[in-house]
Amino acid sequence: MDTSEFWTIVDAARSASTADKPFAEALVDELATRAKDDILRYQERFDEVHGAVYRWDVWAAAYLIGGGCSDDSFMDFRAGLIALGRDWYERAAACPDSLAEHPAVIAAAEGQNDEAVFYEDVNYAASGAFKRIAGDEEDFYEAWDKYRASRDSPEQGSEDMGEEFDFDDPNEMRRRLPRLAALYLRDTPQ
């Protein structure tokens, strides 16, 4: 599955989501219309896109938006970036500070909602769809392990995360993410 097809699936799920059907459910529905191999290819592309934003600057944005951000929460944040769609994902990947323009992030800053952009269920859409068509979630993980073993994929964890910096230093956060810091660090001294 190429990147364009991946984003077509994400966009279809975004279009199908409603107040009664959250994006993650719509994504599972969309994936469940496909063959098992397509779901595995989707997961491969998801992991690639998800891993591409495994960087310190993106983590710092998550840290500001979430009022802190653990490893697990950062996984959910990156899934949430994907759920925002290709345009917002690419904007955030190019400049994490651009998230200060996203309506959900602005609303979250005003209402102190520390879950904006964090979307855990998106991480498990492929396994949910696979379970729906195969009948057993464990079959997904077995199939996924076999699929990955058959591919020539780089080792996970070998990404260059960029320059590490102190997320608890308000001045550093203001320097690196000025627009997000203006939203989230209003009460800290400069």
Image (cartoon, rainbow, N blue to C red):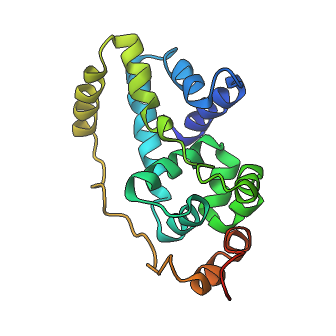
The one of 10 and 20 positioned closer to us in this rendering: 20
Where does the image place residue 172, in percent across and percent down from the top left?
57, 84
Residue 20, quarter of the rendered image = top right
Please name the residue shown 73% across and 72% down the image. Answer: 179
Where does the image place residue 166, in percent across and percent down from the top left?
47, 81
Please name the residue shown 27% across and 55% down the image. Answer: 155
Residue 134, quarter of the rendered image = top left
Q: Is residue 88 left or right of residue 125?
A: right
The quadrant of the rendering that contains the C terminus is: bottom right
Please name the residue shown 53% across and 70% down the image. Answer: 57
Does residue 15 sit above or below 159 in this rendering?
above
Q: Is residue 43 left or right of residue 135?
A: right
Does residue 24 sit above or below 34 in this rendering?
below
Please name the residue shown 47% across and 49% down the image. Answer: 50
Confirm whether residue 153 shows in the render. yes
Where does the image place residue 56, in percent across and percent down from the top left?
47, 70
Q: Is residue 131 left or right of residue 101?
A: left
Q: Is residue 127 left or right of residue 139?
A: right
